Image (cartoon, rainbow, N blue to C red):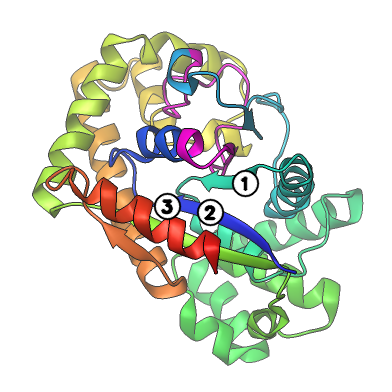
Amino acid sequence: MTQKVLLIVGPTAVGKTDLSIKLAKKFNGEIISGDSMQVYRKLDIGTAKVTEDEMDGIPHHLIDHKNSDERYSVAEFVEESRVAIADIAIRGKLPIIVGGTGFYLQALLDNFQLGTNNDDDLSLRGKLQERAEQLGPEAIWQELNDLDPKAALKIPINNTLRVIRALEVIQKSNELFSAQDDKKTNEYDPFIIGLSTDRAILYERINQRVDLMIQSGLVDEARWLFDQKIDDLPAGKGIGYKELYPYFENTQSLEEATELIKRNSRRYAKRQLTWFRNKMTVNWFDLIEYPEQLAMIEQQVTDWLRN
């Protein structure tokens, strides 16, 4: 029998956390974070990490178990999510994955063969990153295009991190990156709920969230991260943090940095929506304009659990 896994996806600021708690209470669930930044300790405000009060007694997994100077890979996420899903299920509860890091979720559901973060992996990745810096994004993308045109067609030229990941997988597995989609497993039976809303409303909510983050202490949190001098690691590159570095270096005002956080957050939300609409089979709802759709969501989840 396949294991049922409920997913709640979508861009930032659409109410995923609130919905996840409601569904976890109704369907006896526990929550697994599907966010690549919420694994880091002390990065709470900028990652919109769920608070103890918001959890309302619902157990959460894959939050706060990495230091900011550590790397966290999609391979680790997949491995740890599989363990968490099994642990939740064996206790008779429903695994609920909540987050907006689309590639992580796709890698889990489609059983991507990604390897681990051992020394050889990091060495290969470092060499590929060095080549990308020396040759530029177009040249490194062309290398992928020569090896795997099907994969290159789906990856924008300026998405260097994704290009590097594809080349890394090809070199480690001796298989085409595009063939990863052929490794899907029947181990999980997912039901994917997507939250979104009108673009103008979404962008306004993002702007308001950033203002609230600033008021709640984001600058101090970002200052702490800046002082760690880890801007070359994933934690140091998060939206909401990196934009404040010029402010700390006295080359930009706080107002300019805040506007840049808003702009980058809006752009990221747009990329998130594009990913989920193109890569996954999602049942979309708008609880911001139509809160009554909650009843529809609950009914669809009920029907899915019965089948």
In percent of width and height, residue 46 lies at 42, 25
Marker disc for residue 264: none
In percent of width and height, residue 6 lies at 53, 54
In percent of width and height, residue 197 lies at 18, 52
Q: CA distance from mark 3 to mark 1?
A: 14 Å
Marker disc for residue 6: 2
Q: Secondary structure at mark 1?
A: strand
Label pair 1/2, CB-CB below 8 angstroms: yes
- Label 1 Cα neighbours within 10 Å, binned few <14 / some 14-19 / many ≥20: many
Tell me which residue sits at (60%, 39%) in the image.
Answer: 234
Question: In the rendered structure, does residue 164 fall within the stretch colored magenta?
Answer: no
From the viewer's perspective, is the residue at label 2 or at label 3 nearer?
A: 2
Q: CA distance from mark 2 to mark 3?
A: 10 Å
Earlier sequence position, callout 1 versus callout 2 = 2
Q: Amino acid at mark 3?
A: Val
Q: Secondary structure at mark 2?
A: strand
Above or below, 292 relative to 69: below
Chain part drawn in magenta: 24-52
Label pair 2/3, CB-CB below 8 angstroms: no
Marker disc for residue 95: 1
Q: Amino acid at mark 2?
A: Leu
Q: Nearer the viewer, residue 205 or 58?
A: 58
Tell me which residue sits at (82%, 50%) in the image.
Answer: 117
Magenta stretch, main secondary structure class: loop
In percent of width and height, residue 178 lies at 63, 84
Q: Which residue is mark 3?
A: 9
Q: CA distance from mark 1 to mark 2?
A: 6 Å
Question: In the rendered structure, does residue 34 fall within the stretch colored magenta?
Answer: yes
- Label 3 Cα neighbours within 10 Å, binned few <14 / some 14-19 / many ≥20: many
Q: Secondary structure at mark 3?
A: strand
Earlier sequence position, callout 3 versus callout 1 = 3
Q: Amino acid at mark 1?
A: Pro
